[in-house]
Structures are given as structure tokens and as C-alpha cells.
Image (cartoon, rainbow, N blue to C red):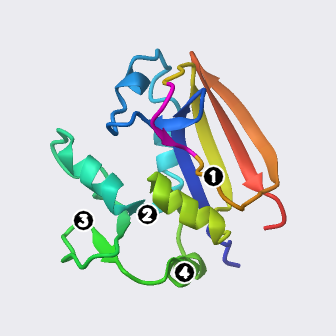
Amino acid sequence: MNQKRSVVLFIAASLDGFIAAKNESLEWLFKVEGEGDNGFAAFYETVDTILMGKRTYDWVMKQDFKEFPYKNKECYVFTSSPHENTGNVQFVHDDINNFVNKLKINNGKNIWVVGGGELLHSFIQEGLVDEFIITIAPTIIGSGIPLFKEGNHQLGLSLIESKTFNQFITLHYQVKNK
């Protein structure tokens, strides 16, 4: 029997709800003392597909990685402008709902929505996120890119688990009625 794949948001946020500073910097996040990789490796093993927006992809590509960080996963980047696929990434121009629902019926592990804020907002509006795993950093940055945009969406969530990683706390929720 095939188990349905879940679309999971796994992300860190400041205590005041921002995922990045206004300049897209994550420097504030790396100043907090965590514990090992704060659960990332264990989570990463549960997914085989990565979804992100074009701005998040551009941010990843600007970082000083020796190689593409998601090279062993299927990686899709949602964009409204045409791009040529690379060896590591397929660019998606399709309807988000149709594309994600096709992914979910295929066999595989879970699907990770990396970000960013605009893509996440669309996923929430379309009811595509099944689980939220949010790691809260004990930092207030005051402004930046919000985890959740204002909008006409309300989601009931059920707490699955909470864990601490030194100064971080990770909250794992499942969307109710999914």
C-alpha cells in the first residue's frame, strides 16, 4: 500500500516571525547557539523532493557552497519567467496546485517546501501544505521577510511534537482535516 506523500514546510524563524532580514540575510540565525544541526539531517532523510521559489534559489546560488546543497534530491524552482533546466534543478511554470498534486500521487518520500515567503503564501492559500516544522530562534529582528504574509487564510493545526536544540525550539504541526 502506498503512503501519501506530505508537503512539509521546514524552516527557521525569529521569535517575532521573520525568516530573513530585509536584505535577505540569515546572519541573525547563525548567531544563535544550537545543538548539532538542530534536527536538519534527520528531517532531510525524510524528503526526496525540494520545492522553492526563484528568489530563494537565487539566494542559495549566491552562497559559498562547494556544490549545490540539494543535488541528491529532485529540486523544482517555481518561477514566472522562462529558465533552462540545469543538472540539479527543474524550473516550473505550471499551475502550483496541479504540479504539487501530481508530485503527491507519485511514490516517494515527503516533499520539502524550502521557501520563500511568496511561494509559501501561495502554498497556504491553495491548501497544499500538510505539515509545518518551524524552528524558533530566540532572536527578535524587528523587520524582514515574514514567515506568514497577511491574507485570508486560516489553518487549524495539531501539534505533533516539540523539541529543543539548545537555544532553539522546533514545533511540528500537522494541518487538521487533511
Residue shown at the point (47%, 48%) measured from the top left = 44
**Mark 1 to mark 4: distance in Å?**
32 Å
Label number found at residue 51: 2
Are circles 4 and 2 on residues that touch, CB within 8 Å?
no
Rendered view: 128 above or below 17: below
Determine whether 56 is above or below 122 in the image. Answer: above
Disc with the residue nearer the chain's start (4 vs 3): 3
Question: Is residue 38 a member of the stretch shown in magenta?
Answer: no
Position of 165 with respect to 88 (left or right) is right
Residue position for label 4: 106
Distance from Cα at disc 4 to Cα at disc 2: 15 Å
**Type of residue at label 3?**
Asn
Q: Which residue is mark 1?
A: 150
The answer to whether the residues at label 1 and label 3 have Cβ atoms under 8 Å apart is: no
Instruction: Say which label, 1 or 2, has the lower sequence index.
Output: 2
Magenta stretch bounds: 142-147
Percent position of residue 82, x then y: 24, 79
Counting residues from the start of the chain, the first of labels 4 and 2 encountered is 2
Is residue 154 or residue 61 the one in the foreground?
154
